[in-house]
Image: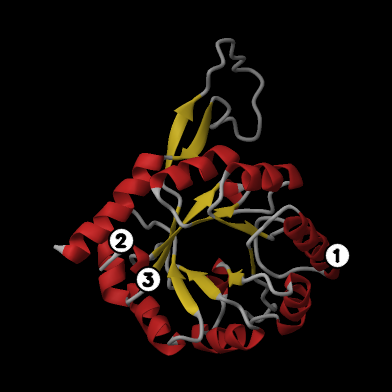
Amino acid sequence: MERSDFKIEICANSVASCIAAREGGADRVELCAGIPEGGTTPSAGMIRCAREAVDIGLNVIIRPRGGDFLYSPGEIKEMLYDIGTAKEHGADGLVFGCLTPEGDVDMRSMSLLMEAAGDIPVTFHRAFDHAMDPFDALEKIVSLGCRRILTSGQKATADLGRGLLSDLVRKAGDRIIIMPGCGVNSSNILRISASTGAREFHFSARKTLESRMVYRNPSATMGNGSEDYSTSVTSADAVRDTIAALLNNHNS
């Protein structure tokens, strides 16, 4: 297999992570804020700076909050505005997903968002992993015109979800791309690829960086305080190593 046979998308939580993803050989980034919440919409400033910093694909997540994927009319309106902002600042693709209270794809909300997206490719994100019937959800997402589905196979990690992922790849055919994500790394990407037939992969490849702050006040914390003096950023080496693990093993 050649490098061109695969597409690698990195979940990037900052402009620095976008740059590291590009340096590591990724084809595309999914730009997110709020990683502890599973990814939320980044600011206009982050989108604009990321677009200026890298020339690889830039997909922007449109998710107004953490938690479930059942959105109020006000939240859908916010998402519509965010789609406009992402397009204005150079996004190549958009990432979103909506469900009904019963765990079905919310066709009404998705149709509104798809209309706002226009010609920009859309990935239906891991809201899919909370759908009641994955095969019904697959067909509805195809009918909406989404380009791909990001999924862990409705398990905690894509490695654990290989069975469903394989079935989804087969059912999808050439109608839509099934992109495994969540917990993908250099130790399992070959296994996921070989057992599912997937050709696009999503992972973060992040490392923790210690804060450069010298003065630290332990009595005043932000949030739960566990990350006050560290940041998480994509590692170019980890991206490179994961791609190499996929290619070297396929070619051995």
Q: Which structural element holds mark 3?
A: loop
Quadrant including the C terminus: bottom left
Question: Which residue position is annotated with label 1?
Answer: 74
| Lower position in the chain sequence, tag 1 or tag 2 | 1
Residue at image position (32%, 52%) is 242
The image quadrant that residue 142 belongs to is bottom right
In front: mark 1 or mark 3?
3
Residue that appears at 33% across and 65% down: 159
What label does residue 199 carry, if any? 3
Dot 2, how many residues are within 10 Å of its Cα: few (below 14), some (14-19), or many (20+)?
many
Which circle, 2 or 3, is nearer the viewer? 3
Counting residues from the start of the chain, the first of labels 1 and 3 encountered is 1
In-image side of 41 versus 174 (left or right): right
Which residue is at 72% across, 76% downward?
114
The residue that disc 2 covers is: 189
* Label 1, label 2: how far apart the Cα atoms are: 39 Å
Amino acid at dot 2: Ile
| Residue 78 showing in the rendered view | yes
Describe the element under mark 2 as helix, strand or loop.
helix
Residue found at x 86% / y 65%: 74
Single out the residue that lies furthest toward the top: 215
Q: The residue under label 1 is which amino acid type?
A: Gly
In the image, is residue 251 above or below residue 197? above
Q: Quadrant of the N terminus?
A: bottom left
Disc 2 vs disc 3: Cβ atoms closer than 8 Å? no
Left or right for 145, reference 45: left
- The alpha-carbon separation of the residues under discs 2 and 3 comes to 11 Å
**Mark 1 or mark 2: which is in front?**
2
Q: Residues within 10 Å of mark 1 (few under 14, many from 20)?
A: few
State the image coordinates of residue 117 (x, y, percent, origin top left): 73, 71
